[in-house]
Amino acid sequence: MIRLIALRELRSLFAMPSTWFVLAALQFIFAWFFLARLDAFLEVQPQLAKIANPPGVTNMVAAPMFNTVALLLMMLVPLFTMRLIAEERRNQTLALLLSSPLSGLHIVLGKFLGLLVFLAVLIAAVPLMLYTLSFGTSLDNGLLLSNILGLFLLTAGYVALGLYISALTAQPVIAAIGTFALLFGLWLADISAVAGDSPWHAISPLHHFLNFNDGLLDSSDAAYFVLFTAVFLLLAIRRLHNNRRYG
């Protein structure tokens, strides 16, 4: 059942013309930033050659690119999650789903996995683009894999949060604004916090992604993303359960 709902979400996403426009626009942005970072690296390479143990192309091109993609996802994900349940409620098709044998768990996980797979395909262009550099130089595979894992976990957390906000309203636009406001607020509080032990650092998804961005695999960061994702998925399931129970 979960697989069928996920496939339904994927088909609906690729059937929308706006999806292809977003895909084209993002690939252009990714390519532009990649070439800009590569050009900047080539310009400073003569100076780097004079330094002992200089940073390589992975540190100066790949890591900043992944960091930029993480910021872009904060703005992009709400545009996709806003319709997951809010649109079903607005079109009055949510009642049909809830009256079917499908449980809230099936609906939430199906929609979550469908969008997560779509976004994973969308951002797969980033590592593929970066691995083209291996034809001319050596890459730090550990740093690249750390960033890929961190970006995937970050995306999963964003999708779970957006899915829950979408379950709270019948207006997709309100869901998008609410999700973006929460994500932007967490990021703003994180970068504004001066103290190193500020609780805002502990609850900010982008702060935990920074360790992956630096190539540091910390189990606490991975656990944070798993818990962050699980909490909002459970809240979304609970919301649908209440809808089914009270109408």
Image (cartoon, rainbow, N blue to C red):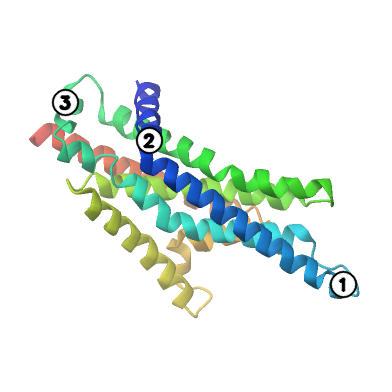
Badge 3 crowding class, 10 Å Cα cut-off, few under 14, some 14 to 19, many 20 or more, is few
Residue displayed at 79% across by 71% down: 43
**Closest to the observer, 233 or 95:** 95
User: Residue 221 location in percent, x, y?
Assistant: 55, 54
Tell me the residue that label 1 is attached to: 46
Looking at the image, do the residues carrying marks 1 and 3 touch, with CB atoms under 8 Å apart? no
Tell me the residue that label 3 is attached to: 96
Badge 1 crowding class, 10 Å Cα cut-off, few under 14, some 14 to 19, many 20 or more, is few
Q: Is residue 195 above or below residue 170?
A: below
Tell me the residue that label 2 is attached to: 13
Whole-number angstrom distance, CA of label 1 to CA of label 3: 64 Å
Q: Nearer the viewer, mark 1 or mark 3?
A: 1
The answer to which of marks 2 and 3 sits earlier in the sequence is 2
Residue displayed at 16% across by 36% down: 91
Q: Is residue 59 left or right of residue 185?
A: right
The answer to which of marks 1 and 2 sits earlier in the sequence is 2
Q: Please tell me whether mark 1 sits on a helix, a strand or a loop.
A: helix
The three-letter amino acid code for the residue at tag 3 is Leu
Residue displayed at 82% across by 46% down: 135
Q: Is residue 36 above or below residue 218?
A: below
User: Residue 222 location in percent, x, y?
Assistant: 54, 49
User: Residue 79 location in percent, x, y?
Assistant: 35, 50
Residue 214 visible in image:
no
